[in-house]
Amino acid sequence: MALFDNDKKWIKINQTFCDILGYTHDELSLLSFEDITHPEDLHTDAAEIEEIIDGARDHYKVDKRYFHKNGHLVNIHFAVSVVRDTDNEVLYFISQIIDITLLKEQEKALKRIISITQDQNDRLKNFAHIVSHNLRSHSGGISALLQLLRDDEPELFENEMIQLLETSSFNLQETINHLSEVVKINLSSNDNLTLIPLSNIINKQIASLTPIAEKNNIKITNNTEENIKVLGISAYVESIILNFITNAIKYSSSERDSFLNINSEKKGPYIIISFTDNGIGIDLDLNKNKLFGMYKTFHDNEDARGIGLFITKNQIETLGGKIEVTSELNKGTTFKVFFKHEKN
């Protein structure tokens, strides 16, 4: 705390103010405001002081930079009030002083992080635009070739493999459309989330993976409520569902008939979708901390890249949800995905 007069001369200074600036009481008493204030901040509160003297106000707050005895800058927050005599004339000012140097440094660091993040987001958006455009061109080419082939030799499309190729082409185009949709969404703001029919998406993903599931002798059952809806982005929700079904197939056990049961329940603000399989399971004691890490793998499967669960977890959290897992080695795994079903 410090007391000063109309001419900004010290009347009284407490020890805390001295300690903040590194001076002894006697040293600081010999200095004026001008001696210790950063030149750019000398007149920061000149108008406020004049208003107090004129009786237009009784207090104000201001941040200033002061020079420490060692030469570095100290950021100070002042809360200034006035004491008047019986004639309403100013006797002196009382200044409550807080060192906010650390706060200012944290503020600068936060601004730097925001700036870096914004730059990274801008680059990512540009990259996504390029990828979306290039993929759309190639996908369009594949679709056009398939259409020409259908026109010239329609009997070929009685072949199951050609039908699957056509379905894959359609799904690729749809995925690219979703990618374009994601690019347009500004940082996946909650304002952009819409209600999405979940059971339809699950059935669609099951249908697209049925040939692979049958090859791996795994039965997939969708027990979710038919009219269930969750808040999300279509591309993200489809990717999340696809990843869990694909993982159940990839890590099914060859020692038994395999299954994946997909169930739903409503709990508070969440719709919980559970994916329960009887696959090879995960040793959570060994792998729990790295389960959702980038490029972290916990099986010997040669197709494992350690990216799927990392991306999926980030997509779920972007939608305001969360994920839980229980698993027992050689018995199976249950992933529970918590989707929001209404906006806060």
Image: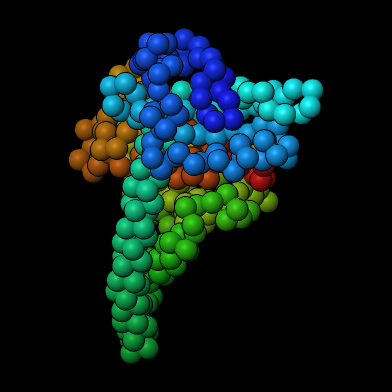
Asked if one can make out residue 332 in the rendered structure from this viewpoint, the answer is no
In the rendering, at what x and y percent does residue 72 appear?
Answer: 30, 28
State whether residue 180 is above or below residue 301. below
* Image-quadrant location for residue 194: bottom right
Which quadrant is home to the C terminus? top right
* Image-quadrant location for residue 283: top left
Residue under the image location 40 percent in, 69 percent down: 173
Residue under the image location 45 percent in, 39 percent down: 42
Q: Is residue 161 left or right of residue 17?
A: left
Front position in the image: 189 or 99? 99
Residue under the image location 64 percent in, 49 percent down: 229
In the rendering, at what x and y percent does residue 107 appear?
Answer: 43, 36
Front position in the image: 218 or 277? 277
Please identify the residue farthest to the right as the structure is shown.
86
Residue under the image location 55 percent in, 39 percent down: 45
Please identify the residue farthest to the bottom as the structure is shown.
152
Which color scheme is applied?
rainbow
Which quadrant is home to the N terminus? top right
In the rendering, at what x and y percent does residue 117 appear?
Answer: 37, 47
State whether residue 121 is above or below residue 26. below
* Image-quadrant location for residue 149: bottom left
Q: Is residue 197 left or right of residue 17?
A: right
Q: Is residue 176 left or right of residue 83?
A: left
Asked if one can make out residue 315 in the rendered structure from this viewpoint, the answer is yes
Question: What number of labels is visible?
Answer: 0
State whether residue 310 is above or below residue 193. above
